[in-house]
Image (spheres, helix red, strand yellow):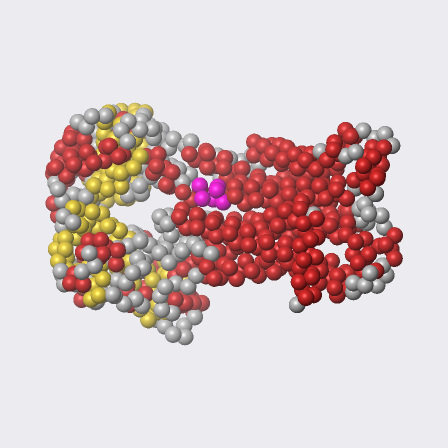
Amino acid sequence: MDTWHHDLRSALHALRRSPGFTLVTVVSAALGIGMATLAFGVAYALLWLPLPFPQPDRLAAVSMERPAEELARPSQVSAPEFFDLGAQCRSSASRTAYRETSLTVLVQERPQEIPAAAVSADFFRVLGTAPRLGRTLRPDDDRMAAPPVAVLGDRLWRRRFGGDPGVVGRTIQVDETPTTVIGVMPPGFNFPRDQEVWVPFAGRLGASPSRAIRNLRMAVRLRSGVSLEAAQAEVRTIGERLASRYPESTAGWSGYLRPLRANALSPETRLALRYLGGASAFIFLIACANLIHLLLVRMTARRQELAVRAAFGAGPGRLARQILTESSLLAGAGGVLGIAFAAVLLARIGEIEAHSGLPSWIHFSLGTAGILFSVAATAAFALLLGSPAAWREARRKDLSPLLKETADAGGSRRLQCLRAAFLVCEIAASVVLLTGASLTVRSLLALRGEPGGVHTTNLITLWVRLPASRYADGAARTRWIEDVLARLRAIHGVRADAASDDLPHYFHAREGLLTPFDPNGRPGPDLRVPVHAVSPGYFDVLGTPLFAGRDLTDAVAEGRGEAVVSESLARALWPRGPAVGRHVLLRCGGAAASFTVVGVAADIRHGLLNAVTAPVLYVPLAAGEPGQVGFLFATRLDIGRLFPEAERRIQATDPRLPVFDAMTLGELRAYILLNDSRRTLLALLCAAVALVLALLGVYGVLSYTVSRQLRAIGVRLALGATRRQLMRQIVGRGLALTLLGLALGLAGALLLGRLLAPYLYHVSPADPVSFAGIAILVFDAAFIACYLPARRVLEIDPVDVLREE
């Protein structure tokens, strides 16, 4: 015990004598351990955190996908495919289908939109979760003519009913339909994402659901003893069978089965996770290189000290133990700071991701697994710092060469080259990450600046859900919307307003099969296009120009009406002639109607800003379908002032209608760019940490080298060398290594740019602005890191230095 205390005191004393080395080493270890722990914490939450269900390894997701599509995304299944897969798949003990939606629930006498899910009867059985109160769905509940029932989530139960156990059996209004509450789920259950109500979906499928409309998610619980590989092979075989039986809707599609967790992550989330993992590995290696070459510098300077201690009786084991104690202190301090750094970042990520659409079971926190990982990383750093030097000292036999060395010896030529190689690799790795971050930043800026065919300034959107039971008639629905528009237009500060069943970036559009006709009445090839029902003035409010013709007048009579086509649709249907005056036949939802094209509008990006512009057909509101209606305002009022008044005026026409999702179009664009913003922030964080580590390496090595060569510098000053010459030499040495690292890093950045190319928008993978900007940034930062230790030359008095020696 006394020996251990003595080693600890000696180690602390040695580290206090070298505060610069200690600080640089601890910060490097903290950043390396912190970023590694952050990457592990995110990966653990997304990939390995156990699902909150019994036997989670037996849960799998089934989907239909197009394997031939580039960057194919996991699809869903149609209702007929769900029934076919469920009947033919022998690998599953139970299966369920579900669809996220929202329902209007009367909460405290006010209609509110509640996140909900329409599910099949076996939904809760597949997940293996029992209710807190009452029961869950039975097969009899999931029939077309079954009485409406609902299962409530714990939060809604407490908020709406005050936690009253007598809610089971009570009738509530759900979508204006009397619905019996049959159960309440336990706290924390909100699968699949943030749901608060679950209802049977049988009554919501329609009389004959289409195989081409894949809007259901499917989950299965595998039978005991059935492997994922065997179940996947069976699902693929069933998919091939369906494709051959129904080629018009399923040709080219195939069945896939994956673990439920894996299927829940979007391609964007997987990309961000891969980037974080790769960048963290880079940073960890940079930190390791930093620590190794700092250790080489320090141990080269301490060789004579250790030899003297050995000459006075310290054995090889004692010297090795001393070195390991120092490295453990450095790594331990860095580990504590790294854990705190990772915990803060994980908490911040948890706040950002709370409403990003990730599955309900994902929670970002350090946790026991993260702490254990940090401890292991800290131990690895301690061994990395101390083991090589301790092993060398333990094996040393002859001390005489070390005793003859001068105090300012800089080490062998081989060690100097090794230290230089480490510095060059650090700078190169930081340049790669910085350039990748610059490319993603410029891509995000290009996306944010993408007008998408609209002017987003001073535009506010909100939504109203119209129940089909009272607004099925197109003419009645149009009269109600016109009445509401007139009331909203009367609000002081509203310059213009419009309505549509799908506003930009909301993804509510329905699809229809469009048949164009030439002037002689001959039909052309069919084309499947999104169909938007809009009010007159819609394009004017959005600031979208009409290239030809005029706006809609909402005229629909005897199956014929007016329509406006987007510019890309006009080019696709009539590349050689004018579109205005042409006729089209639209088949949508089992109905068919003819329209005359009266105008051509500029393309609007209704979906993602980086997606290819889709051709769109705009029809009058009366030709739309009952459901949600979006209102668009051109106003300088903020949402806090506009929304209460707009809600009051809308509910004055019908107090049972919920008004929800009020936001500016700019806020909506920021939301749909969330994944791009997340990747950009992640790239900036990793690049900043890498740059700091590289600069710490440059500064630490030069600073420590200067401190150990004070005598040599003093001698050169005494012999006539100028301080400017010495500073230029020290700074030049660091900048030469920086330029070499820059060259290697920019070459690596070209390769990284090719990997990022599919995710960049209007930015070249070899963007000269990014490459030049990063080169200037790194060179300037490295110059400062070299100049700071070189300034010590200005403070050296050669007489004092020589006297000290």
Compared with 194, 316 (above or below) is: below
Q: Quadrant of residue 327?
A: bottom right
Q: Is residue 324 above or below residue 730?
A: below
Residue 680 percent across, percent down from the top left? 48, 41
Q: Relative to the observer, which residue lies in front, 397 or 473?
A: 397
At horizontal 52% and vertical 54% (from top left) the residue drawn is: 339
On-image quarter of the C terminus: top right
Q: Does 335 sit left or right of 15 as displayed? A: left
Q: Nearer the viewer, residue 152 or 55?
A: 152
Image quarter where the N terminus lies is bottom right
Q: Which residues are magenta?
A: 677-682
Q: Is residue 58 above or below residue 362?
A: below
x and y percent of residue 618 in the render? 26, 35
Could you say where residue 273 lies in the image, as x and y percent from the top left?
A: 48, 51
499 vs 51: above or below: above
Numbered disc total: 0
The residue at 31%/53% (across/down) is 194
- From the viewer's side, name the closer residue of 340 and 754: 340
Is residue 42 on the magenta stretch? no
Residue furthest to the front in view is 2
The picture quadrant where one finds residue 572 is top left
Secondary structure mainly formed by the magenta segment: helix
Left or right, 257 with respect to 465, comes to right
